[in-house]
Image (cartoon, grey):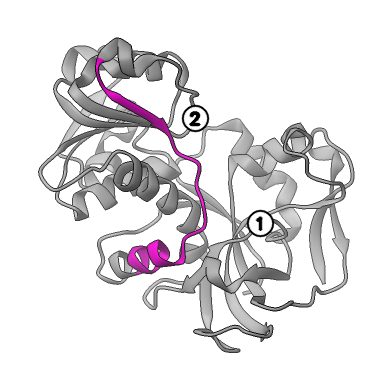
Amino acid sequence: MKAVVIDAYGNNDVVRYIDADCPIPRASEVLIKVHAAGVNPVDWKIRGGLGQRLGMSLPIHLGGEVAGIIEEVGDGVSGFKVGDAVYGIIPMGGFAEYAIASAGDLAHKPFNVDFIQAAALPLGALTAWQAMFDLAKLSNGQRLLVTNSSGGVGSLAIQLAKAMGAHVTGMGSARNEAYILSLGADEFIDYRQQRFEDVAHDMDVVFDTVGGETFDRAFLTLRKGGFLVTAVAFPQDEASTFGVGVGRVYCKPNAEQLASIRAFAEAGKLKAHVATVLPLASVKEALYLSEGGRTRGKIVLQVTS
């Protein structure tokens, strides 16, 4: 089978598209014939050296977000059978024609979206879900600010928050205003034309996917007792300084949440915006585009047509 691997850390020169042995599922695992794989910043960060800092051992098979069809099931697997269409997050090895996944990390693919769309959902939707609902406890009627509303995570966060009955203020550049409002945002802030903290006030929750100065200034938009959750920054003592809650989300596989996300997708309330689809062999181009940070929406590798 074809797979994407790195034997050293560095730029895209270390990325290799190789022939590899097809993996064999162990107990509680399934073998997935991958149809599509989502590309995420963590992929090029691992390639660039994050893998070493995380204690990962070379060689590393890249890719952690997939959609495909179950080819084989290991001992003890229940709830899935050969031929089922699934989607989810796997530890590594998703940029390949076949990949291994723990059955407990997967859910059935939404019936009304193709594999490309399905592969664009798990990481972003789970990150948004765990940030807003698990950590920040966002609920019906509350006010939410999303700092980067046109990104892969932020765009899904808006849709999930609206599906839960929240009032959403989206933030972005003027060129993305129509897109952000089309996602369901109630209000829009052009951060290039105005200081967002001068416009947004009394927010119950802020979901930050920008970090840096944006993260620091976002505290000024919260009501006392509100909650700021970030996917990129590393909170320090802001909670006591501003009288709010603060936390960082670390996305984890969760089959139950994936099933809920599937239900929203099947109800037409959640859709990932896929910006670019490339063949698996063009993985270097995909990583280059992701690292550039200028793509609106998701980059997906098509593995099997």
Q: Which residues are magenta?
A: 243-262
Q: Nearer the viewer, residue 78 or 118?
A: 78
Q: Which residue shows up at 60% across the image and 31% down it?
A: 292
Which of the labelled discs sits on residue 44, or is there none? none
Which residue is identified by label 2?
A: 232
Helix, strand or loop under label 2: loop
**Rendered location of residue 67, percent (x, y):** 56, 68
What amino acid is found at the position of numbered circle 2 in the picture? Val
Q: Nearer the viewer, residue 137 or 37?
A: 137
Gap in angstroms between the C-alphas marked 1 and 2: 20 Å
Helix, strand or loop under label 1: loop
**Rendered location of residue 213, percent (x, y):** 42, 13
Q: Residue furthest front?
A: 240
Q: Are marks 1 and 2 in contact (CB under 8 Å)?
A: no
Is residue 179 located in the magenta-colored stretch of the structure?
A: no
**Rendered location of residue 123, percent (x, y):** 50, 52
What amino acid is found at the position of numbered circle 1 in the picture? Pro
Q: Is residue 192 visible?
A: no
Is residue 255 located in the magenta-colored stretch of the structure?
A: yes
Q: Which residue shows up at 68% across the image and 36% down it?
A: 45
Q: Which residue shows up at 89% across the image and 46% down it?
A: 7
Which of the labelled discs sits on residue 91, or is there none? 1
Q: Earlier in the sequence, mark 1 or mark 2?
A: 1
